[in-house]
Amino acid sequence: MDNIIEIKNVSKVYNKGCAEVTALSDVNLAVERGAFTAIIGKSGSGKSTLMNILGCLDTPSAGEYYLEGERVSTLGERRLSYIRNNVVGFIFQSFNLIPTMTALENVELPLIYRKTDRHKRLELARNALEMVGLSNRINHCPFELSGGQQQRVAIARAIAAEPSLILADEPTGNLDISAGRDVMHILSELNNSGKTIVLITHDSSVAKKAGNQIEISDGQIVSDNKYFRYNKRNNT
Ligand SMILES: Nc1ncnc2c1ncn2[C@@H]1O[C@H](COP(=O)(O)OP(=O)(O)O)[C@@H](O)[C@H]1O
Ligand SMILES: [Mg+2]
């Protein structure tokens, strides 16, 4: 079994504010390469904290995180930044596009960070925008695009650099039903083409579109249907 993600006994305690908050408590999680996994839980259950750790935007207070077999929980900022730019593609609820840049320029940005040469950069960015059905909008700025189109630009930006892992935190949270469905369809297509996707959502109808569902509550994993299926198979 090839696990792209392995989280072992991870806890996260925030203690910068007035009171200590345990956002994750002894979490164990494995994600197979090529899987489409949804992490579902109510607001405040620890989903974004977990996503930030998975994406190397934050580090655990305790426990170990292995990404593509590399122990990242103890790495320094330089290597973490390299991983963020090369291994992970991020999709956020609020799109996080640069308002003064066109769709094409937004998608090119991570490729500039990766020092991809201009010719290759344009090719990868155009291909990614084509994949999300926006070839006819590449020179539009975010304010000229609908919410659904903006999220599709954000998906193109996440996939242009061909990351091993796509992390999406509530990607349909700011969209209407139809645009949300389009986004889920694109994510399913990406998964069918071999991409590993971890999707975070509070919406069970969105989570159902993924192959595996993991439920988090009060910073703990309370169900993981991958293991449920595994246990069922082994009990019969
Ligand atoms: N930077 C922070 N400092 C202090 N507490 C935080 C911080 N970020 C999140 N929390 C707390 O950690 C818990 C989990 O938050 P979060 O991971 O954002 O949940 P979710 O994404 O599921 O809504 C919440 O109780 C929240 O208030
Ligand atoms: Mg959140």
Image (cartoon, rainbow, N blue to C red):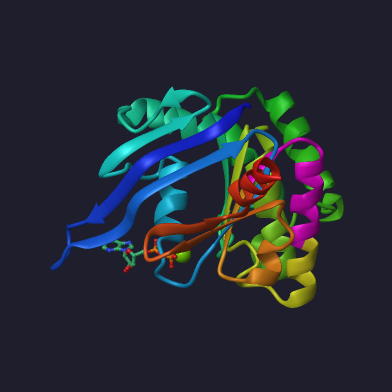
Mark yes or no: residue 102 visible: no
198 sits left or right of 184 in the view = left
Q: Quadrant of residue 207?
A: bottom right
Note whether 16 is above or below 116 in the view shown: below
Q: Quadrant of residue 98?
A: bottom right
Considering every residue shown, the one lying at the far left of the view is 18
Query: In front: 135, or 183?
Result: 183
Q: How many numbered marks are there?
A: 0
Note whether 101 is above or below 33 in the view shown: below
80 sits left or right of 117 in the view = left
Q: Which secondary structure dominates the residues rendered in magenta?
A: helix
The residue range painted magenta reads 183-197
User: For the N terminus, which image quadrant?
Assistant: top right
User: For the C terminus, which image quadrant?
Assistant: top right
- Determine the residue positioned at 75% across, 43% down: 191
Quarter holding ligand 1: bottom left
Residue 26 lies, in percent from the top left, at 33, 49
- Determine the residue positioned at 65% across, 45% down: 235
Residue 76 lies, in percent from the top left, at 30, 28
Does the segment drawn in magenta span residue 14? no
Query: In front: 233, or 22?
Result: 233
- Determine the residue positioned at 72% across, 77% down: 176
Residue 41 lies, in percent from the top left, at 51, 67
Q: Quadrant of residue 80?
A: top left
Considering every residue shown, the one lying at the far front of the view is 236
Mark yes or no: residue 168 visible: yes
- Determine the residue positioned at 73% across, 25% down: 119
Query: In front: 41, or 115?
Result: 41
Note whether 147 is above or below 14 in the view shown: below
115 sits left or right of 218 in the view = right
